[in-house]
Image: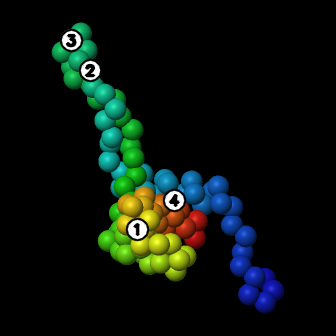
Amino acid sequence: MAGGDAPKTDKKAEIKAYIQHHLQDSYDFSLFSYTTDDGEHKYIGAPLPVILWDERLSTVGAFNLSSQLDVNVSKRVKTIDQNAAAFILQGAIDYLNN
């Protein structure tokens, strides 16, 4: 590699490895259950990875960002939950992409 070039990564393989790693720490999410004719209780579900995400400062971040974008205060207050949710989602997407 010349002069600090980063190696190219296969994003698909990287995401697949990431998901497989987190499936080891997954919890079964029960979709539905039923009882068979012989009385056995069956659960149908799927393992879902659990990734903890600290969102404590999302409202503050969204409020500050809207302040920097010169959005008036009444509109900031009306849309703060919506903007905080977008702030959390974008942070998680950025984290998964890096």
User: Dot 1 corresponds to which residue?
Assistant: 74
Outermost residue toward the bottom in this view: 3
User: Dot 4 corresponds to which residue?
Assistant: 18
Callout 2: SS: strand
- When the figure is inspected, residue 26 is found, relative to residue 72, above or below; the finding is above
| Alpha carbons under labels 2 and 1: distance apart | 51 Å
Residue 28 is left or right of residue 71, and the answer is left
User: Dot 2 corresponds to which residue?
Assistant: 34
Mark 1 vs mark 3, foreground winner is 1
| Alpha carbons under labels 3 and 2: distance apart | 11 Å
Q: Quadrant of the N terminus?
A: bottom right
Residue 84 is left or right of residue 37, and the answer is right
- Asked whether 97 or 74 is in front, the reply is 74
Q: Amino acid at mark 1?
A: Ser
Q: Residue at x 22, y 23 (%)?
A: 41
Q: Quadrant of the C terminus?
A: bottom right
